[in-house]
Each structure stands twice: as C-alpha cells, then as structure tokens.
Image: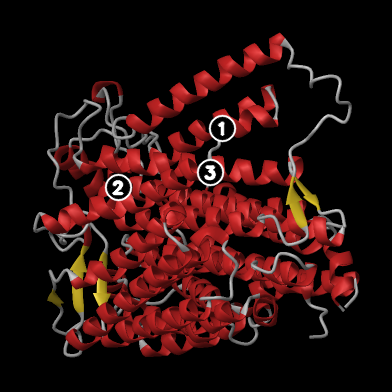
Amino acid sequence: MTGVDLAVSTSAIVPASIAVPLAGAGTMAGFSWLLPRWARDLLAIAVALATTTLTLILMASSAGHPMIYWFSGWRPSGGMVIGVDYAAGPLGAGMASLAGVLASAALVYTWRYFDSARGRHHALILIFLAASVDFCLTGDLFNLFVAFELVAVTAFALTGYNAGHPAPLQGAINFAVTNSLGGMSVLMGVGFLYARTGSLNLAQIGQALTGRHADGLIVVAFALLTGGFLVKAAVVPFHFWLPDAYGSAPIPVCVLFAGVMSELGLFAVIRVWDTVFSGLPAGRGRGCRRCCSGSGSSPRWSGRSWHWPRST
Amino acid sequence: MSVLAYGVVAWLFLFGIYGVVTSRNLVHLVVCLSVAQSATDILLLEIGYRTGGHAPVFVSLSAHPGPAVDPVMQALALTDVVVGAAVTALLLALAVQVHKRAGTLDPDALRATRE
Amino acid sequence: MSRRARLVLFTAAAAALAVTLGAGLAGLPSFGGQITSYARILNELAPRQRHVTDVVSAITFDYRGIDTLFEEFILLGAVAGISVLLRPLSDETRQLPQDKAPDRTIPPPSPAVWLLAVLLSSLLVLTGLETITHGTLTPGGGFQGGVILASAIYVVFLGTNYATVERFQPAPLLEASDGVGASGYVFIGLLGLLAGASFLSNVVGLGVTGNPISGGTIPLLNLVVGVEVAGGFVILASEFLDQTAVIRTRRR
C-alpha cells in the first residue's frame, strides 16, 4: 500500500464502530436481568443496526483513500510505529457492514428462537459482530490475531447451543480444536514476522520486506499465516470442520457462519498478502504461493486426521 | 543454545498435536491442546529474549544494570495465555456435557456413535 | 478410517510440519541476540511518558490497549458461552444436595480444614487485590490479580460445602461485575474521545512514578479488568460446581 495517499483520520466513527457493539454486549451480559425479554431483543437489534450504519458510513468515507485511525493517540514517531491503528478501506468496511447486516438478521430471527438464557446469546452475537468489524478494519497483525480468536471463541460458544445431544456437542468440539490449531499457526507466523522485521504493523512490515530477498523464514511465516486463515475460511483442504459446525449450530448462527466467517478468512489472506508480502520480488512471490498450497496444508492434515472418518 | 531453545518449541508443538490426534479421553485432548498452545507462548518469549537482560520492570534501577528484554513479546504472550484459558474452559464445558449425554469421553467411541 | 491408518497419515503430515517449522525456526535470529528497535524504544519511552515502572502493563493497557479490550471480551464471551452450555436443559432440574435421613444435619467441616480455608482465602483475596492495584509498578495487573481473587472461592468450597459457597455467588452480582468490567473498559476508552483525543487515550493525570496511583488510565483499566476477570472466573466455578452438585436429570 505504498504510494497511496493515507489520510490520518480523527473521525470518531472509526472507534465507535467497535465501541458501540462492545458496550452493547457488555450491558447485555451484565444487566440483562434488569430488562424484560422484548427490551433485550430490541436493544440488541438496535445496537447491531447502529453498527451496520457506522460501517456503511465508513465505507462511503474511505472510498477515495483508506482512513488511518491511531488508538490511544500513539502516532508513529521517528518512522517507528508504536501504537495500534485501524486502516479502514472500502473493502474492509464493506465486509464489516455485511457482518452487521447478517448479525441484525440473526438477532431478529432469534426473537423467539432461543429460550430465555438471560441475554447471553445477544451478547455473544454482538461480540461476534464487534470482532468481525475489528478483523476487517485493523492495520495491526497482532490485533488481527486477537480478533480472529474472538470470532472463533464466540462462534464455538454459539455452536454449542444444542447442548442436549451428543452429536452437535461433538461437532462443536471438532470445530473448536481445528480453529484453535489454526489460531496457533497464525500466532507463530506473527512471531516469525516480528522477529524479522521488528514491527507488528501491517504497513510497516510490508515496507520492511519490500525488495528484500524472501528467505526461508519469510516463506514459512507466510505459509503459517495463510494456513491458519484458510482454516477459518474452510477452504479445501481445510474445510472439514464446516459440516460439523453447520450441523451443530442453530439456524440463526449458521447465517452468521455462512455469511461472515469464511469470508473473513479469505479477506485476511488477501489483506496480509497485499500489505505484507506483495513487496517481495515477484519470483519469490510465486514461490510463496506454491509453498502456501503445499506446506500450509500439512499442519491441517495432521490436525484433521483424528476425525477423518465421517460419513456426512 | 539456539537449537535447544527453538527445538523445545517444535517438540512441544508436535507432541501436543500428537496427543490431540491419538487421545482416548476428551479431557486429555484438551490438555494436549494447551500444551501445543504453550509452545507458541514459549516461541514468543524466546523471540523477545536478550542474553543478560533483565525484566522490563524499572524499579530500583541501580540494582538492575544493563539492557531489558522485549516487553512487547511479553504482552503478546500474556494475551495468548488468556486466549488459551478461555478456549480450554469452553472445551472442558463441552466435554462435561458430552460425558453427561453420551456416557463416554473417548473420542473414538463418540465418533462411532455418529456414524 | 482405522486408528492405524490415521496414525500413518498423522506421521506423514507431522513430518512435513516439522520440516516447515524447522525451516522457520532455523531462520530466526540467534537466541538471546539483539531485541527489536520497537522493544528498545518502548523500554526507554514508557517509564518517562507514562510514569510507570512496569513496561509490560503500559504496553498492555496503553500503547496496545485496544488488543486488551478484545482480550477482555474473549474472556467475557467464553464465560457467557459456558453459562449457555452448562445451563439446566429441558430434562434437568436444579436440586440442592439433601441428606436423606431427616433426623440429622450434615456434619460441619473439621475445625482444622475450616481454619485453613479461612486463612488461605483471606490470603488469596489480599494477594489478588495487591496484584491488581500494583499492576503499574510490578509484574501483575488486572488479569493475574483477578484470577487470584477468584480462586479464593474455590478454596472456600474445598474447605466447606456447596451451600456455603452458594451464598457467595449471587448470580445478579456476578453478572453485573462481568458487565461492569467489560463495558467499563469501553467507557474509559470513550473518555479519551470526549476529551478530544483518540479512543483509549490516557487523559487522566499521570501522577508520580512509583506511586500506586500513577500512569493515568492504566490503574483504572487494571481495576476494571480485575473486576471482570474475578467475576468471570467465579461464574465459571459456580457453573462447573452446579453441574456436579446440583443439576440432576428430572425423574419422570
């Protein structure tokens, strides 16, 4: 993303797009016993719709150039990035709006679907939404990992709703174990990239790697990152957890999975490739792609082999 | 020294996954998963280590001369520990319910009942 | 696929993974060598700019505070998920353990065990509070201190019985503490926005280095996270304990 005019933004809409769903989720988790059933549903849907509106505004405002927002006020000093930023682009904000629309739809559908469960489902869906927004907007590699794990944890929790039968429970366990292994793979890739470039910021890592010779460490980091994200995206051959999760989860949750989770995984691969690895010399770039499909699949084969035989 | 330090990471991770694949008990499986998780934490901390460095806590500076180790990697490892604890807790809750509903904690037996 | 075939497949995949990892690990800078300039800059800047002595706390709650916000919600999500998973289902009921013989009461715990429980739990509460409040000065902070605080409940259960522990676990209070902890972090972040700076900026007075109250919003965030983590882990304990002690299949 070098050479693009990156305007630093101080617009409050950027942090609001995650602060609103998170505050809503915290309130639902902690104080839902104060509200009657209809108020809980209404509040959750209102929060989800508000988040969707905010991300749509972001998509419109960032159409010309990506908006960079620095959290905690830590602008880069001396060419060194110190804090965490959001690099909101139209693609990311668009995906975040999609997540908002689907989360609102899922919440409307749960109007009478879930039993009372004291507002926890609403909290979980709102947290899922906030994590998806963060995943799509962030410009920091470790923040991407944390958002990845948060989406995963809320997804496991929502999958296990049908706790009364062993089959959905087992599906949830398969889902959780596979996605955990994917998360570990991503974290190791993050560690390797940090060791080489000394930064956790996507743009800065990209700058540090531009024009450099892509040695074994970079290729392995790329393989680990891509492999981990492709597990989430359920791209073949990492797709085995998908039937488990879809079979186990209640329908409103399947809406979220189908529309959001797989897309998030692919989005992450594209984003990481675009900002971090695209600056490498073209020949090695192709080598990266070849390596990815080869070496990235083997960690998942080993993780998958324990529940390989399934007739579904 | 590097070989030993980084070899531990690979060893723990591979054995954790081996445990997950060959486990006969869901609780054992969850523990093996957290062993693999700890391998990633160790990797982060080792990347941040500096020979002769002290902890990045600057109390009584005169007693701690010299450089400090990487605080960023320690913050990352802290976050990873919390994430691991959350996932472990969720998986154990799932295991409790599975045991109640299916009467067994053996992944092989559970798999057989699904087919 | 038989167990043996699975093992063969795993060995092949693990070998490939080992080679990949090995190649990556071999490319790392040598163990104990130079740390990155990012780390060096933060080690120099943090004590001066934020008046803290524990740089890791400053990074967790200030420089990279947004990561910690999501980390806190990972814990909240996990606790909410466990409450959903372990809730009494349609064929179950909550029934306190009862002694079948009506003419005698449950014998109290032995004095030695009871005394040990009292001592240990008080010690744990004190240690937990100390760890939370001194997060800016020494290693520790909200997460670590919150877990220590919550473990006091486990000790009370071990030393007494379920009925006693239940008194300390009023569900609305626990859920409220979780909610306060989680939304509290967001609201402290919004303080930064209200003050005209960025979200999660440190806009409270910084204080003197070495005092427990220094670092601006950092001790506040520590407190808020400590409340949330302690509440969350006590909820966890009560959910798992309920499963063993209280939840029974409904007799038809």
Query: Mark 3 touching mark 2, by CB under 8 A?
Result: no
Density class for disc 1 (Cα within 10 Å; few <14, some 14-19, many ≥20) is many
Task: Output the chain of dot 1.
Answer: C
Q: Relative to residue C238, is residue C97 drawn left or right?
A: right
- Pick the residue in front: A135 or A190: A135
Q: Nearer the viewer, mark 3 or mark 2?
A: 3
In the figure, A112 relative to C82: above or below? below
Residue occupying image coordinates x 19% and y 60%: A80
Residue at numbered disc 3: C171
Q: Which mark is residue C61?
A: 2
Q: Amino acid at mark 1?
A: Ser
Residue at numbered disc 1: C151
In the figure, C131 relative to C194: above or below? above
Q: Amino acid at mark 3?
A: Ala
Density class for disc 2 (Cα within 10 Å; few <14, some 14-19, many ≥20) is many
Q: CA distance from mark 1 to mark 3?
A: 17 Å
Residue occupying image coordinates x 33% and y 82%: A92
- Pick the residue in front: B100 or A186: B100
N-term mark: 3 or 2 = 2
N-term mark: 2 or 1 = 2
Q: Are marks 2 and 1 on the same chain?
A: yes
Task: Output the chain of dot 2.
Answer: C
Q: CA distance from mark 2 to mark 1?
A: 24 Å
Q: How is the image coloured?
A: secondary structure
Residue A10: percent from left, percent from top: 12, 69
In the figure, C17 relative to C87: above or below? below
Which element is circle 2 on? helix
Q: Are marks 1 and 3 on the same chain?
A: yes
Residue A28: percent from left, percent from top: 42, 59
Q: CA distance from mark 3 to mark 2?
A: 29 Å
